[in-house]
Image: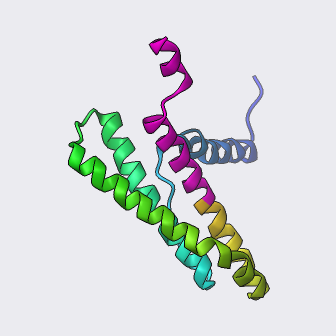
């Protein structure tokens, strides 16, 4: 039997350490960026995005846990979500100009923060579509 060298053991351990979090990623909450980009409109956009994401994630978690959510709370949640989306839409026109006027390192940090916000918005879009529009499988069952 061939012996596994110390370097191979370390490499194998590192693969497992880095691969396990990736496999369980879909069940975890997306974390907001740790540091602000210091581009005012980008930071406001990212903050508003993660406020919306938090509301959608909590609602999704409660529904998946089987908790009955009262209609009043759902209505309030939808109202706050609409306000968050409106605030996002007000910020969007200034993003590109503010990023292009910023120094290179701030541009890079702003881009990274916007990519995290994009992931959060994608989750929100998919989740909201699932709850309010339904899935194709549900439509097939109704017919």
- Seen at 49% across and 66% down, the residue is 86
Q: Position of residue 81 (x, y in %)?
A: 41, 58
Location of residue 68 (image quadrant): top left
Q: Can residue 35 be spotted in the picture?
A: no
Is 121 situated above or below 60?
below
| Residues rendered magenta in the picture | 118-143
- In depth, the one of 40 and 90 nearer the eye is 90
Q: Is residue 26 left or right of residue 5?
A: left
Specify the quadrant that holds the N terminus. top right
Q: Up-down: is 82 above or below 129?
A: below
Q: Magenta stretch: dominant SS?
A: helix
In the image, is residue 39 part of the stretch drawn in magenta? no
Q: Residue at x 36, y 53 (%)?
A: 78
Is 111 on the left or on the right of 45, as rendered? Answer: right
Q: Can residue 115 be seen at all in this image of the molecule?
A: yes
Image location (x, y in percent) of residue 102: 74, 87
Work out whether 50 lies above or below 17.
below
Looking at the rendering, which quadrant does residue 98 occupy?
bottom right
Residue at 49 percent across and 11 percent down: it is 143
Pinpoint residue 125: horizontal percent, then vertical percent. 54, 47
Q: Find residue 4 and report its horizontal and vertical position in percent.
A: 73, 35
Question: 52 or 106: nearer the eye?
Answer: 52
Residue 141 in magenta stretch = yes
What's the residue at 64%, 67% (across, down)?
A: 114
- Which one is nearer the viewer's eye here, 97 or 47? 97
């Amino acid at each position: 039997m061939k012996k596994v060298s110390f370097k191979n053991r370390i490499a194998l351990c590192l693969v497992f350490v880095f691969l396990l979090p990736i496999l369980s990623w879909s069940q975890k909450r997306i974390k907001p960026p740790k540091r602000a980009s210091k581009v005012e409109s980008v930071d406001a956009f990212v903050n508003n995005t993660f406020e919306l994401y938090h509301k959608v994630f909590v609602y999704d978690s409660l529904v998946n846990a089987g908790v009955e959510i009262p209609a009043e709370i759902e209505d309030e949640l939808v109202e706050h979500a609409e306000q968050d989306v409106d605030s996002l839409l007000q910020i969007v026109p200034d993003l590109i100009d503010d990023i292009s006027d910023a120094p290179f390192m701030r541009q890079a940090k702003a881009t990274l923060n916007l990519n995290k916000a994009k992931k959060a918005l994608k989750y929100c879009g998919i989740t909201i579509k699932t709850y309010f529009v339904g899935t194709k499988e549900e439509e097939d069952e109704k017919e």
